[in-house]
Amino acid sequence: MVVIAIVFPILYVAFPTKAQDEINSADLVVTNQSILSPTADTFYLEQTIVLVTSNDDSATLDAWKASLCLEQQCQYPFAEIDVPKSQAKNDTRLQVSQGVQIINMTEFDKYTRLALGSEVFNFYLKGKGKLHKGAWPSANVHYDKEITLKGLNALNGFNVTAFHIMIPPLADGTNVNGTVYMPNPSISAYELGGLALNMSVDGTPIGTALLENVFLGPDNHSFPITAITNLTMVAGLVQGQYQTGVLPVDVVGSSVIYMGQHIPWYEQALGALPLRVDLNITPALQQAGLVGSLDIGPPP
Ligand SMILES: *[C@@H]1O[C@H](CO)[C@@H](O)[C@H](O)[C@H]1NC(C)=O
Ligand SMILES: *[C@@H]1O[C@H](CO)[C@@H](O)[C@H](O)[C@H]1NC(C)=O
Ligand SMILES: *[C@@H]1O[C@H](CO)[C@@H](O)[C@H](O)[C@H]1NC(C)=O
Ligand SMILES: *[C@@H]1O[C@H](CO)[C@@H](O)[C@H](O)[C@H]1NC(C)=O
Ligand SMILES: *[C@@H]1O[C@H](CO)[C@@H](O)[C@H](O)[C@H]1NC(C)=O
Ligand SMILES: *[C@@H]1O[C@H](CO)[C@@H](O)[C@H](O)[C@H]1NC(C)=O
Ligand SMILES: *[C@@H]1O[C@H](CO)[C@@H](O)[C@H](O)[C@H]1NC(C)=O
Ligand SMILES: *[C@@H]1O[C@H](CO)[C@@H](O)[C@H](O)[C@H]1NC(C)=O
């Protein structure tokens, strides 16, 4: 759960201080967020925000446009969202459901890297609105707050939990299938689409892997994976330096394609995130009947 405090400085005095004090102490809690249907410069946002305040009077907040920024001065917003009109009282739920245009890609690339790479990250929400209360004239309010969200924490815990060598390979060269485990400790869901990954050992490429229709919701998830792997090279590695059969495989995202379109803001973030999987390849080799021909045994 993420707590967001909002500051409402009043530009001109419009109603009693007591009501204002109550509003000053309001928090916003983002309980749920989904980034859906990505394109090169847009996405669809579903976000649930809960207003937490000690105020139980019948004040109303107008709809307002929020700029989302990485820096507090908010010189270069990466997006704007429409926050709906709502009651100002405790436990009011706000639902944001809208297409979002990315207005500064440099900043949004940074945002995506933070969201992927950090345990916790911050951004800023800025804007102006109005508050209405009973017969009082409306008051201008400024929203200006640092927002803290949990990130994907560099996909810490990423793993290959099943690995199977396909004999014979498919026509396109696919010769490995298996299961990838991806934890998501955040409250955010990400619709990614097709992920292509480069795999290498000690800087030498050993193949490419594909995950299709990836929708990474909160919590831990497993996805099917297929790969085109140079098994000759893998065999060489386990006969040589890695006789335990455990290969330290470096994995890095090389493309993210949603509905046939590259999503560069995901690609740059995943391409900058090195992942390492210690892959015990012996069971797959045994299962495929390759252990004898490779002259290796099970790990000690
Ligand atoms: C979060 O929002 C999505 C989409 O609006 C919805 O399907 C899901 O049930 C929500 N999850 C929670 C925990 O509220
Ligand atoms: C606000 O609402 C929440 C959820 O219903 C409740 O737990 C909390 O005690 C309320 N706070 C106040 C000050 O009434
Ligand atoms: C986008 O933000 C960068 C800073 O990251 C800034 O240099 C650039 O001028 C901004 N572009 C636009 C179109 O505002
Ligand atoms: C998710 O995975 C992480 C890391 O692998 C683990 O610490 C955590 O307990 C798991 N959570 C659930 C709900 O399984
Ligand atoms: C990765 O998955 C394999 C197979 O399930 C398991 O043996 C291994 O302990 C896991 N590695 C980590 C770091 O969780
Ligand atoms: C891999 O493909 C084989 C068929 O070649 C199938 O039996 C197996 O269930 C698949 N394994 C995984 C983990 O997808
Ligand atoms: C696979 O690796 C072997 C040994 O390193 C190499 O000779 C061969 O060219 C590679 N095959 C492909 C298709 O890259
Ligand atoms: C993935 O591998 C391809 C082919 O070797 C290479 O062109 C590309 O730069 C690699 N991508 C990353 C992110 O390393």
Image (spheres, rainbow, N blue to C red):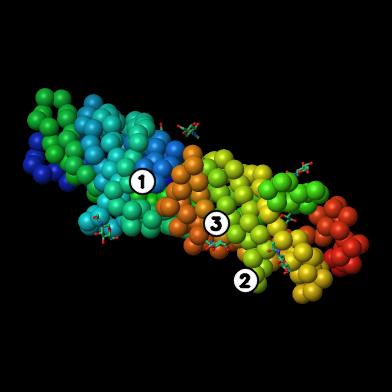
The residue at the point 22 percent across, 44 percent down is 127
Q: CA distance from mark 1 to mark 2?
A: 33 Å
Residue 178 % position (x, y): 71, 48
Q: CA distance from mark 3 to mark 2?
A: 15 Å
Q: Is mark 3 within 8 Å of ligand 8?
A: yes
Q: Which mark is residue 253?
A: 3
Callout 3: SS: strand
Q: Report which residue position mark 2 lands on.
A: 203
Residue 295 % position (x, y): 89, 67
**Dots 1, 2 in contact, CB < 8 A:** no
Depicted 240 relative to depicted 179: above or below: below
* Mark 1 Cα-neighbour bin, 10 Å: few <14, some 14–19, many ≥20: some
Type of the residue with mark 3: Gly
**Dots 3, 2 in contact, CB < 8 A:** no
Residue 258 % position (x, y): 49, 42
Callout 1: SS: loop
The residue at the point 17 percent across, 29 percent down is 133
Q: Report which residue position mark 1 lands on.
A: 41
In which image quadrant can residue 87 be found?
top left
In front here: 173 or 280?
A: 173
Type of the residue with mark 1: Asp
Q: CA distance from mark 3 to mark 1?
A: 19 Å
Answer with left or right where residue 276 lies relative to residue 90.
right
Answer with left or right where residue 137 lies relative to residue 197.
left
Which of pointers 3 and 2 lies earlier in the amino acid sequence?
2
Seen as rendered, the residue at the extreme front is 171
